[in-house]
Amino acid sequence: MLKQMTLITLGWLAGAAFADAPLPPVTVYAPTVCLACIDYAEHLRNNGFTVKLVPSDDMAAVKRRLKVPKHLEAEPTATVAGYFVEGHVPADDIKELLREKRKARGLSVPGLPLGAPGREFSSPTCDTACTVLDGDTGQGRVRRELYETLLVKPDGDTSIYARH
């Protein structure tokens, strides 16, 4: 019984130590004048990361240098602790990857899904509805899309890491 309690205590202490450990800095590469990218960098800051925002006129070169698979590309591209972070990946997904220390190239949220961090329209959670009607035309406009964060494995294959 004492041995079991000691293991539980050690596990709790290890988790607490990770929670107290400072997060590694994130470098976010973004096209010059990308407001959604600036909002994304702010999302990361609000979740405890120190962020360096680097404007780039050649995002394709950044993605090639980091070996981001073409079919997973988005805006922006970031690096943290040896991983790439492609697109508007939630900070909690990044923190989980850092905690797990998975063997991977990085995480990706391909494209620009509405509702992803930095891509919200007034209600990131859609508590009441995810479609807003335009008053003039009566046409619906999606305010939030379902999307997935993909884990990019060392060989470039992917698996679903989180659903949002």
Image: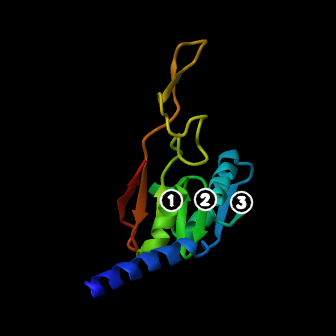
Judged from this view, the residue extending furthest toward the left is 1
Of pointers 3 and 2, the one earlier in the residue sequence: 2
Q: In this view, does 32 lie above or below 95?
A: above
Judged from this view, the residue extending furthest toward the front is 2
Q: What element carries label 2?
A: loop
Tell me the crowding category of disc 3: few under 14, some 14 to 19, or many 20 or more residues within 10 angstroms, Cα based: some
Left/right placement of residue 67 relative to residue 48 reads: left
The residue labelled by disc 2 is: 47
The spot of residue 96 in percent (x, y) is 46, 66
Tell me the crowding category of disc 1: few under 14, some 14 to 19, or many 20 or more residues within 10 angstroms, Cα based: few
Nearer to me, 40 or 112: 40
Q: In this view, does 36 lie above or below 6?
A: above
Tell me the crowding category of disc 2: few under 14, some 14 to 19, or many 20 or more residues within 10 angstroms, Cα based: some
Q: What residue type is labelled 1?
A: Asp
Residue at x-position 52% and y-position 78%: 17
Which label number is shown at residue 92?
A: 1
Q: What residue type is labelled 2?
A: Asn
Of pointers 1 and 3, the one earlier in the residue sequence: 3
Residue at x-position 52% and y-position 56%: 89
Q: In this view, does 29 lie above or below 35?
A: below
